[in-house]
Amino acid sequence: MSDEIKHECGLAFLRLRKPFSYYQQKYRTVLWGLNKMYLLMEKQHNRGQDGAGLAVVKLNVEAGYPFLSRIRSGNAQPIADIFRQIGQEYSELQKFNTDIGNHPGLMKGHMSFLGELLLGHLRYGTQGKNNVEFCHPFIKRNTIPARNLALAGNFNLINTDELFGLVNIDPGEFQRQSDLAAMMEVIYHFLIKDDELSPGQLDIASILRKALPLFDGGFHVGAVTGNGIGFVFRDAHGIRPSYYYIDEEVVVAASERAAIRTTFNVGENEVQELMPGQALIVYENGDIKIEQVLEPKERKACSFERIYFSRGSDEKIYRERSALGYNLSKQILAAIDHDLKHTIISFIPNTAEVAFYGLMKGLQDYLNQVKVERILAWGNDVDPEKLTEMINRKIRMEKIAIKDVKMRTFITEDVNRSEMVQHVYDITYGTVQKDTDTLVVIDDSIVRGTTLKESIIRMLARLHPKRIIVVSSSPQIRYPDCYGIDMSKMGDFIAFQAAIELLKERDMESLLKDLYDTCKELNRNNQLHTVNVVKQVYKTFTNEEITKKIAALITPPGLTVPVDVIYQTIESLHEACPNNLGDWYFTGNYPTPGGNRVVNKAFMNYIEGRNVRGY
């Protein structure tokens, strides 16, 4: 992907269903649960690299002994750092008793993080706050075990200020900057109320039914209580992904199906999706329940999970990304006037690779059809040499762009820094026929277009192609996200910049002031959530007009090679990813009212010159 997008975050939940002696006897290690948690987190490291955390609860602990432990890291390799520290504790114990690993009871008593409930988290910060204090899980402590709570999740909330008001809390600076802090306070409020009514007998489903309707956002959240209850819940639209697996040994939940499959070596159908509005609850006695804690609403699972974020090792995601590429083949054939002989297909490393394979298949299917038609047209007049040439015709593909190491430079002058930045990508020389070949490169998406303009296109132009076509396997990104993706500022989007330029060219800039006035009026009347005003910015222009302007904007000054852009259509996106129809960043159709408020606020920030997010 050329424009990096940060995404919040990855969740890993594990509840052991057997005593530690069982795992010691069967797997020859009492650390089986910790080892599985490490794998479950490591297999989701794509979802978070700013930090990681782990909370562990021990069951049936005598009064006065610790039962809830937490460790967090903001190091460059946070998962490894966490489990290195846990491993050091084990090593220290072995110094005094080399045989302690064969005694599960002693191990549980002496190792802080050897417990039956484990809650792990990987963080991508969407607010620029990457210090360890912002790493999940967050915890609430109390001398009463049931009133201890650890919480972690993959989510964003839009109404945090309102939530603090509902529980009569004046948030501090730290709390204002954390959605999890707001969620924690609300859930903990109802947890305390429930424990006051029935001490030590928490009704988690009832607590969630009271708390979750108050949250405006997309969320997949896990939690553990000090008295041994673990639970995972998902928003009513299913915006954020959630999967679980249950067998006689373990209960597992995670943000990605493939992570569970790989960690526990199970089949696709053995891993279930936690459906929108549901909660998976494992009580302290081991009872497992799936409860509907929110009324399910129209499914709007995030399509970006399929395009980019989730790992492509999931077989369904692999097929869908391949389909995204396949669906673009007709547009590309039309753009090159079906001249495959003088066209080279490539991709922007590395996550666009699967879409590239799908695109190649689509083009090859077309070429095979041409071969059959021409051979049939020859009838009996077949020349062996001509037939051989026809059969051997293939789509030309090359690995053109190479992602280099992250470039760092001491140079501060803009002109010199620009020269250095373009070398983030390297190219393969000798692959393009100078001034003859059209170069087609596919990417996951085009968000800001900065890397394309400053690096990729400049480098590709060094090969002297006749023409460069940049293909996006996603549609135009036009609107902010507010449910977990770090795309919150209108001015960052190349599609929005293109629309603004078109308004200027056509002397229609007054529309921006009119829309800004409309937003201010809606805000005064507390109606900013009722309509997406920003849609009017794009309504004047066709997709083709905006696409053409984007191509102009990402073309570096002075470049003589023509640059064109092709985008996936909304219809083709939905065809390829039929179960993930959340497309608000493309269409502006937000699943919750808070989405409209965010996009309108982001537009107001843009007009006012404020470089802050819209929520």
Image (spheres, rainbow, N blue to C red):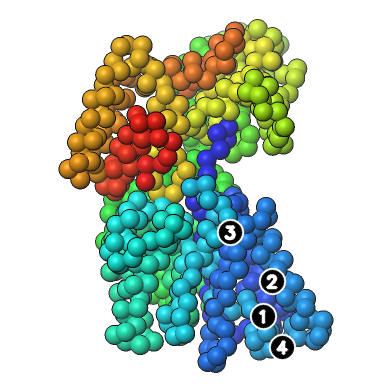
Residue 132 shows which numbered tag? Answer: 3
Observer-nearest of 94 and 161: 161
Residue identifier under label 1 = 111
Q: CA distance from mark 4 to mark 3?
A: 34 Å
Q: CA distance from mark 1 to mark 3?
A: 23 Å
- Sequence-wise, which precedes: disc 4 or disc 3? 4
Q: Residues within 10 Å of mark 3 (few under 14, many from 20)?
A: some
Dot 2: element: helix
Residue identifier under label 2 = 86
- Sequence-wise, which precedes: disc 1 or disc 4? 4
Residue positioned 30% across, 37% down in the render: 600
Q: CA distance from mark 1 to mark 4?
A: 12 Å
Question: Between tags 4 and 3, which lies in front?
Answer: 3
Q: CA distance from mark 2 to mark 1?
A: 8 Å
Residue 151 shows which numbered tag? Answer: none
Question: Between tags 3 and 2, which lies in front?
Answer: 3
- Sequence-wise, which precedes: disc 4 or disc 2? 2
